[in-house]
Image: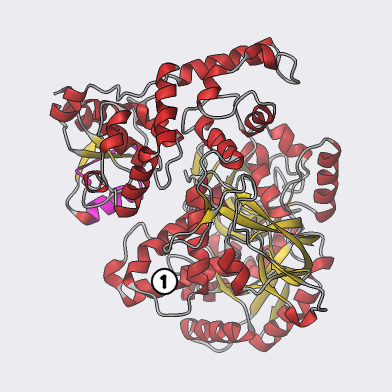
Amino acid sequence: MYTKQQELQYFEQGKRFLENESPLETSDVEPLRTIINYADWKYYLQSEPVFSDYEYDLLFKKLLQLETLHPEMITTDSPTQRVAYGLSERFNQAAHLVPMLSLDNTYNAQDLYDWDARCKEFAGTNNIEYCVEPKYDGASISLVYENGKLVRGVTRGDGITGEDITANIRQIRSIPLSANFDAEQIQQIEIRGEVVIHKDVFAAYNAQRAKENLPPLANPRNAASGTLRILNPEEVRKRKLSAILYSISYYTATAPEQTAAKLDTHYNAISRLYQLGFPTPHEEMKRFSAIEDVIAYCQTFEDRRDSLPYEVDGLVIKVNHFELQEKMGMTSHHPRWAVAYKFKARQATATLLQVVFQVGRTGTITPVAKITPTPIGGVMVSSISLFNEDVIREKDLMIGDTVLVERAGDVIPYIVKSLNELRKGTEAPIIFPTHCPDCEQPLEKTEDEAVWRCINISCPSQVIERLIHFCSKDAMDIRGMGEANVKKFYSLGIIKDIPSLFRIDWDSIKNLDGFGAKSINNLQAAITHSKQQPLHRLIFGLGIRHVGETMAKTLAHSVTHINELFDRDAAQLMTLDDIGPKVATSIVDFFSLSENRLQLHELKTLGINLENNLNIAATTQGSLSGKTFLFTGTLQHYKRSEAEAKAEAKGGIIVGSVSSKLNYLVVGAEAGSKLEKAKKLGTVTILTEEAFLKMIEA
């Protein structure tokens, strides 16, 4: 869904928003939404969080504050209008019986005092009993039992609908497959909980992976979340997952009043689940009548978090009596009667040993700090990106410094600051190179960027990264030519640039490990197939700065042959959709270089397609000429890519998002936020799939 470039861009933008203490503008609304949607995607779908919970909450609150001040800017697809985001397409979907809401977060005593005051206001009483339990750091699940039998296990998903992972849930031995709910006369019940991995089990599993020369799993939470999405239940069983069930969200009973009398509080409900054989936080659950006692417990509990068998990242405080919970209600995002008290971010100190400078595909020089290997939040951290020279200067970093490193659940750790009060006088300044660390050519830096670049397109590091990008799935899709093989072939001199991919001496690789006759035949076939890829894939594969997949299509559809781009100036390019001055300048710079023109000439002689294979007359004079299309939801008659191709064949233009420039939104089954946004705009024509088919057949 996101390219590596986009991921880095949104991560850096998010960090800038977090560091910005000045008032935000209305123009910040869309960037904040984009960053939060990206963070949700990484957290819920990829199990690879990029912001700490605290940072995410700050970003969310900044957006919420902006929308509160400017309610006219609220859209139905804003992250503030939903619980969360992300469903895998590998499992069937199942609706929760009750929405699975998030929890609001607190970080200090004052936050809890404020929450207590709100609770008393909504409950209409000062006599509230609170129940406190650990906040387990795992993967949220919802279990449904009918007539005492486990019938469904579902991931949290988007809070309304989740992934049906019943087969995997059955592999977790701590979860009963049946329970005696007859005593409470319960017919159907929905139970919420968290799938976790015991710390010792996690350590042993990673030790075994190390023996097998496999990379370790990142941390217990990501391991639990990722395991639940494994399609093979047998593999799930091997990972020895556990579960903690912490709430009853819904039930039906033959004698509702009698059942409700027994399950009148959260504490009693969890105690009864424990008696029925469910794993619950019963040992750690405490009840308090005063918020001061809750706060004291939170502070003492944090000191012993590491002694617990499972990872916890805070405590959950709930109003104990269900009658008061019902009276207090909930917002669209979280219940008013519960809140999470989050522990301090995971931090550790380390020694900054050295800084190495890496060269990216577009020549970007990225400083990477090498620190003493340091365990943070279950992960051994030894390398940390410093992004650019400005970060080094702003944080006043020196080689030999003791630095504070924070992970806070993130996959990407970062250096918070240098503890310069601990300096001994032997530290050395970090010297940012003036020349490329690989090819030794002078570096350049433009006024509008924070990064230094190597502009030598023949720089070996850039060549390798460009080759990897060129062969990638979304570009020329040369299967079998992944990162490892690209680096191996380049180091052996088998390939040296993009054209050399199509001149491989196959006899030279027959004796390489892993390259038998079948592997070679498959790679040959993939390279041959790539020669006829559509022009937009080639343009994307060339790695032009600021040109992504959609932009590559725009460029490809504006020409009959790629050579026509040689003579386009910035003004001409900016007449195309979504091309501004920066992108136009980058395109002009790329095609004006003689080296790039010679490369394209070589590719032509090697049989690579450099033409727009669409019928140009059709695209300029077709019945849909100049009309923009976007597809959303699940189509019944065609894959989305096939439908897009049919629109393009008639002259239609495919765009990537809903905006005032969109003419037609084609809606399939289960259409989501794009449909709502299009309705809100009021200028977009919404078509069913059948109406679209009639349009292209006309």
The local secondary structure at tag 1 comes to: helix
Return the x and y of residue 37 as percentages of the image width and height.
46, 56
Which residue is labeled 1 in the image? 64
In the image: residue 537, left or right of residue 89: left
Determine the image quadrant of residue 373.
bottom right
Image point (39%, 34%), residue name? 539
The reply to whether residue 90 is visible in this rendering is no
Q: Amino acid at mark 1?
A: Leu
Q: Is residue 667 magenta?
A: yes
Q: Is residue 282 left or right of residue 637?
A: right
Residue 152 pos. (x, y %):
59, 42
**Relative to the observer, which residue lies in front, 217 or 20?**
20
Provide the residue span drawn in magenta: 662-680
From the viewer's side, name the closer residue of 392 and 307.
Answer: 392
Q: Is residue 209 visible?
A: yes
From this view, report whether residue 457 is shown above or below residue 122. Answer: above
Q: Quadrant of residue 267?
A: bottom right
Percent position of residue 593, x then y: 40, 39
- Horizontally, is 390 left or right of 540 in the view? right
271 to 325, vertically: above or below: above
Q: Residue at x 70, y 42 (%)?
A: 177
Q: Quadrant of the C terminus?
A: top left
Report the residue at 35% width, 74% height from top: 25
